[in-house]
Image (cartoon, rainbow, N blue to C red):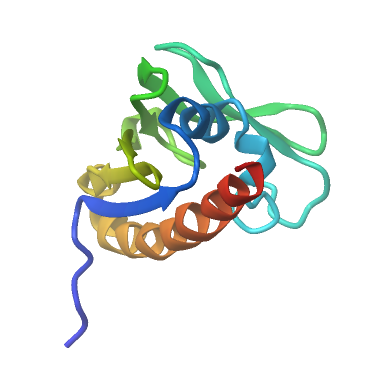
Amino acid sequence: MLDTPQDPIRKSVTVPLPPDDAFALFTAGINRWWPMDTHSLSSGEGDASVRVEPRVGGRILETLPDGTDAPWATVTTWEPGRRFAARWYVGRSEDEATTLEVTFTATEAGTRVDLTHGGFDAHGSTGPQACANYTKGWDHVLGQCFHSQCEMAA
């Protein structure tokens, strides 16, 4: 029997940066670490970038190779150095948004970054598969890409 993905997804990583720097890299520096070649709307289609508008109501936007912007999410919480949250709907309508929350907590080693991603019931019958895909995806995106960029920035 296959394991059912747990909603919400919970991932944690400790990075060698203070919380303010980890938050800034996660948000303002997202284009430095996000794996656009594999985890974007334009995967493998050429030059694309991603950015976060730094405010509640701001959006996470992918600039596609043709120069148009495609929204990924809408920022719902903006607490620099502490907490970031968004309604996440990459490639879907806003009606199908899930919830993403990332917290930044100081530790002796730097910062513990805790990511929670839930609400996959908004995807209807495809929710369990989306949850399973994001469970694996966040391991790569947060656990490898973000963590590696933090180590380089330290």
Q: Which residue is at a point 19% across and 77% down the rendered structure image?
A: 3
In the figure, residue 112 lies in which quadrant? top left
Percent x, y of residue 101: 31, 35
Please give the name of the residue rendered at 51% of the width and 21% of the height, measured from the top-left corner: 59
Left or right position of 54 against 33: left
Q: Is residue 114 left or right of residue 52?
A: left
Residue 70 lies, in percent from the top left, at: 62, 30
Q: Quadrant of the C terminus?
A: top right
Image quarter (top left, top right, bottom left or bottom right) of the N terminus: bottom left
Q: Is residue 59 above or below residue 113?
A: above
Number of labelled discs? 0
Residue 146: image x %, image y %? 54, 49
Q: Nearer the viewer, residue 19 or 123?
A: 19
Nearest the viewer among 100 and 14 is 14
Instruction: Please indicate whether residue 99 sits to the left or right of residue 62 in the image.
Output: left
Which residue lies most toward the front here? 108
Task: Specify whether residue 9 is in view.
Answer: yes
Q: Residue at coordinates 52% horizontally, 52% vertically from top-left?
A: 147
Q: Residue at 50% of width from left, 61% of height from top? A: 140
**Outermost residue toward the bottom in this view:** 1
| Residue 114 image-quadrant placement | top left
Report x, y in % for residue 76: 34, 19
Decide if residue 5 is on the left or right side of residue 135. Answer: left
**127 or 53, which lies in front?**
53
